[in-house]
Image: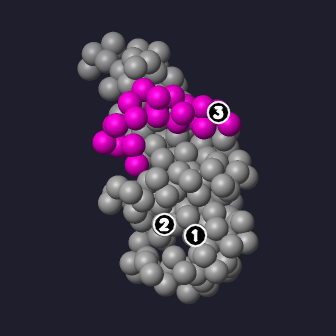
Amino acid sequence: LDPDVAEAYLVLGLNALFVRKFDVAENMATTAVELNPCNGLCWLAIGLVALYRDRHEEAIEHFARVERLNPRDPLQWLFQVAASLAYFFKGDFDSSLHYARLAQTNPLGRVSGDLLEVASLSAKKRYEDASSLLATNPPKQRSWEFVLTRLPFENPARRQELVNYISQVNSTIFPQADHEIGYKAQ
């Protein structure tokens, strides 16, 4: 209720982002950063808005700021997953792979990190390495689909790009890969 509390705008911004109200999300996240530029989660929120709106360079800058603000943040895995996604769609698959692997060091970043590692390896045409990862650590049934359907890309083709790269390595992970894995409102 206090208009001077950055965290309130942060929560409103993230909520708006995940229900795909991108302009509202951007306004709320921007206000959160203006109110508390030292809060890494505020920078994460504004970075996520940029990421899901296909402004990858801007997203990477915001995620780098998060990393500098608190390199020991317990949510660092979340920043690393977001950075991996931003680098992936920028076309920098080496950096995407780097951040995916960093995210995997935290149990909470494992599923998304594995998904992004396989997609990055596939994009680099390192199919054997991706297949090896899948053989030693296969995703739980539908876990990757669960993750993908919750990524609120403004451009839904982005989600399908990830599916296509993963399907090049193993077409059984997304059996309906011929059809777009779409956004499912909860």
Magenta span? 57-77
Q: Nearer the viewer, mark 1 or mark 3?
A: 1
- Which residue lies at the image location 73% right of the left edge and 52% below the top edge? 91
- Which residue lies at the image location 39% right of the left edge and 78% below the top edge? 140
For the N terminus, the image quarter is top left
Q: Nearer the viewer, residue 19 or 47?
A: 47
Tell me the distance, in whole angstroms, between the alpha carbons under discs 2 and 3.
Answer: 24 Å
- At mark 1, the secondary structure is helix
Q: Nearer the viewer, mark 2 or mark 3?
A: 2
- Which residue lies at the image location 48% right of the left edge and 71% below the top edge? 145
* Residue 72 belongs to magenta span: yes
Q: Residues within 10 Å of mark 2 (few under 14, many from 20)?
A: many
Q: Earlier in the sequence, mark 1 or mark 3?
A: 3
Q: How is the image coloured?
A: one colour
For the C terminus, the image quarter is bottom left
Above/below status of 28 relative to 118: above
Q: Main secondary structure of the magenta part?
A: helix
Q: Which mark is residue 58?
A: 3
Residue 5: image quadrant is: top left
Residue 49: image quadrant is: top right
Q: State the residue position of label 2.
A: 114
Q: Are marks 2 and 1 in contact (CB under 8 Å)?
A: yes
Q: Residues within 10 Å of mark 1 (few under 14, many from 20)?
A: many
